[in-house]
Every structure is written in structure tokens, then in C-alpha cells.
Amino acid sequence: MKNKAVILGNNYYIGLSTIRCLGIEGVHTVAMDYSENERYAVTSKYCNEKLIVPHYKENTEEFINFLIEYAEKQDKKPVLIPCHDAYVEVIDMHLEQLKQYYYIPQTKQGLYTEVMNKETLSSLAMKNGVKVPETIRVGEDNFYNKIENIIKFPCLVKPVDSPAFVEKFRKKLFKVHSTQELDEAIERAHQADLEVIVQRIIPGFDDHMYTFDAYLNQESKVTHWVTCQKLRQYPINFGASVYTIQKHTPELYEIGASFLEAIQYKGFAEIEFKKDADTGEFYLIEINARITNFNSLLYKIGMNFPYITYREMI
């Protein structure tokens, strides 16, 4: 196979597992990063090339130019695979330009960003009949009254732009137990120039978190899918998964596939759901528009999503 796979973000185990998933199938892998710091994925025996590139955020134009110049030197069009949200955002911003030089599953510019943004995702979900946790925008009419009567304490202060929030605070959200804590959390976000929303906590422990992992082809049809159940997260309740199992949950296919197909999504996506401990209903929490930390688990049960992406693209 002459088409190379360019992997962005190799200082984390998602990049490492992606390189392994492609390399074991004989794909020539190219690791691109802006720093050598903690870049452990490049030490894999399946990594064929390792390059240092301009910083995707601090030197965006130079980064895009580097990608284009690299692709122009290749005999065959490479496949571009981001392993971090920040890279997905940059690719989405320059999608029309990059698609001339790289194979990228998504064809609609802005859709990646739309599903990663909490507010626009919530709007898309409700429009397509998918339940999302009750949400109040900061500063809307009767804000505190709605918090008391609809959201109730404790509740969550969540970022609209998750990657920027995590980069600043090293956590996904703020959990608050009173009006005073709510105001303090909102002020912290505003001082960091970050927009936040307030959301109801869906009852249930970590084992009420589920995922629908799927690949959608260029006709926006689900061709591969699997469901998983989280058992533990770190930090507990609102962190990253540290203990997850594959669990066949057909109901999630009915919800997830219909939604992704309706919004004309293409490529890999992971939808996180939470099952309400009181009602048993599934609520859409977020969408990961790139390879996730379950990648090795999915590979071991027969779903090599990086290679599925690569094969369809070439």
C-alpha cells in the first residue's frame, strides 16, 4: 500500500494505538508533532517516519503549509488521521484546502466543529429527536430561577469549547453545589475568556456511561459499529474512562446511527451516552470526532477503526 497515513498527536496513547493499528496491516505511518516532548508513540516499531512540524495553534498557517508541502512530495495522496480534538478543529477550519492533498473522510466543512461544540451539538440532537441533558445558557432570562427549578444543585458548568477548557483547567468541567459556587465557576471561565453552559446532572454512577463507536462511509451510512459500557472513570463521575468493556446494546445503535446519518456525518465517531438511573432513558453527552482512548479495546474485539478509515479512503 503506497498511500501513507499521517498521524497527528503522538504524545498520547491514542496516537500510539493508531500507529499500531495501521502498521500491523502494513501501512506506512508518519508521526507528525510540534515537539519531541513525551512523544513516545514514535518509538513504536510500526512508526516509519517521524517529523517535527510547526505548532498547529501558534503557527497555524505554517503548520498547514507544512502538511501541504509534505503531501505534494508523495507519490500517492496520504490519509490524514488526527488523534486530538485540537488537530480536528484545525483540519476542519482548513478542510477544503487540505482535502486537495489528503484523504479525509468528512466532506462538509464545519461539521466536525459543530458536533464537538456543546451548544451546537445539543441543538442538532434535539432537532433530530435525541435526548440531551437540560441546559441553561449563562445570562439568559430568569437564569437563577431556571437553575433552581429546572437544573437544580449540584449541577455542571461545562465548556462550549472542550479542548480549550481542558487545556486551561486540566479538567472537563466544574461541578457546583450552590449559587455562590456557580458564580465563582462562571467567573473563572470568563476570566479565561471561555464560554460555558450550565447542565443538569443525569443520575447514575460511572457504569451508566455508554458509547456508540461507528464508522460512516462516504454515503453517510453506518458500515461498522460497536457499543461499550464504562465501569470506571478518573476523576470519578466526570473524567476519562479507565475501565471499559464491550457490551452489545442495540438500543444505542437505533439512537446513534439514526442521528449520525441524519446529520450527514462521515468517518469515525464516538457518541457518549448516559443512561438515566431513574428512567432508563439514554442521554447524548458528547461526540468524539476522532480516534479515542478505547481504540485498543475496539481493535482487540475486531474493529480496527484507523484501518477501516484508511481502506475506505484509498
Image (cartoon, rainbow, N blue to C red):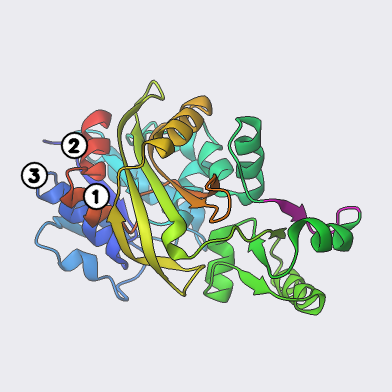
In front here: 232 or 78? 232
Q: Is residue 40 visible?
A: yes
Determine whether the residue tagged by mark 1 lies in a helix, strand or loop.
Answer: helix
2 vs 1, front mark: 1
- Between the residue at mark 2 and the residue at mark 1, the CA separation in whole angstroms equals 24 Å
Residue at (75, 64) in percent of width and height = 152
Q: Is residue 30 left or right of residue 232?
A: left
Residue 89 bears which disc, if any?
none
Residue behind mark 1: 298
Q: Quickly name the residue at label 3.
A: 26
Residue 290 drawn above or below residue 314: below
23 vs 128, left or right, is left
What secondary structure is marked by label 3?
loop
Badges 2 and 3: C-beta atoms under 8 Å apart? no
Q: Position of residue 158 (x, y in %)?
A: 64, 62
Mark with earlier residue (2, 1): 2
Give the image location of residue 78, x and y in percent: 26, 39
State the quadrant of the N terminus.
top left
